[in-house]
Image (spheres, grey):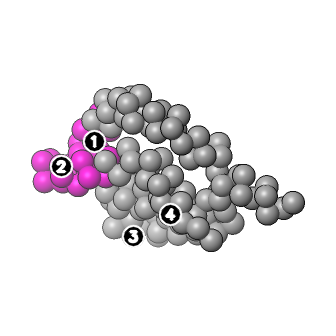
Amino acid sequence: MKIEWRYSLINNMPLIVFGVIYWLLKGASPRGWDQLAISLAVLAVLWLPYYLFVQRPYFSRHPEEKPGSHIISGLGWIITVIYIMAMVVLLKLDVQPAASPAIVLVTISLVLCIRDSLSVKRLALQQEQH
């Protein structure tokens, strides 16, 4: 299995930047939700320029890396389902670290990066079937 790290990176860069901004603002406010709101505002402002000036030109130069050219593998789906079940259980049991916005955001970003890096190119999958 080939790791699609470029696809994962270009697809999830806004989430990675969001996590870094959130982490940098960690001490800026005593309330975690203020940090989240500021980080979401920065993400909203930066997402469109990122899409217009980075993602769209990259996909036009590398059409094989477009999201429509990838299929999430079985292992990617298994990791995603296990993560969702674990977060539901942890939140139901009221485990304190799991209720932190920072932990939730970091783990969501990490799972999405792993899931996308384990994706399979649609063309390669079609060639294997024939």
Mark 4–mark 3 Cα distance, whole angstroms, equals: 24 Å
Percent position of residue 25, x then y:
18, 49
Percent position of residue 31, x then y:
20, 49
Q: Which residue is mark 3?
A: 95
Mark 3 Cα shell of 10 Å, populated few (<14), some (14-19), many (≥20): few
Residue type (three-letter) at the residue carrying disc 4: Ile
Residue type (three-letter) at the residue carrying disc 1: Ser
Q: Which residue is mark 1?
A: 39
Q: Which badge, 4 or 3, is on the more N-terminal residue?
A: 3
Numbered range of the magenta stretch: 18-41
Q: Secondary structure at mark 4?
A: helix
Percent position of residue 48, x then y:
39, 28
Q: Residue furthest right?
A: 130
Mark 2–mark 3 Cα distance, whole angstroms, equals: 23 Å
40 is higher (above) or lower (below) than 84? above
Question: Measuring 47% from the left and 55% from the top, which residue is drawn there?
Answer: 6
Q: Secondary structure at mark 2?
A: loop
Q: Which residue is mark 4?
A: 114
Q: Which badge, 2 or 4, is on the more N-terminal residue?
A: 2
Q: Secondary structure at mark 3?
A: loop
Q: In terms of depth relative to the viewer, which is nearer, 51 or 32?
A: 51
Question: Measuring 27% from the left and 35% from the top, which residue is drawn there?
Answer: 42
Mark 4 Cα shell of 10 Å, populated few (<14), some (14-19), many (≥20): many
The quadrant of the image that shows the C terminus is bottom right
Question: Measuring 31% from the left and 29% from the top, which residue is drawn there?
Answer: 45
Q: Which residue is mark 2?
A: 25
Question: Measuring 60% from the left and 46% from the top, which residue is drawn there?
Answer: 64
Q: Nearer the viewer, mark 2 or mark 3?
A: 2
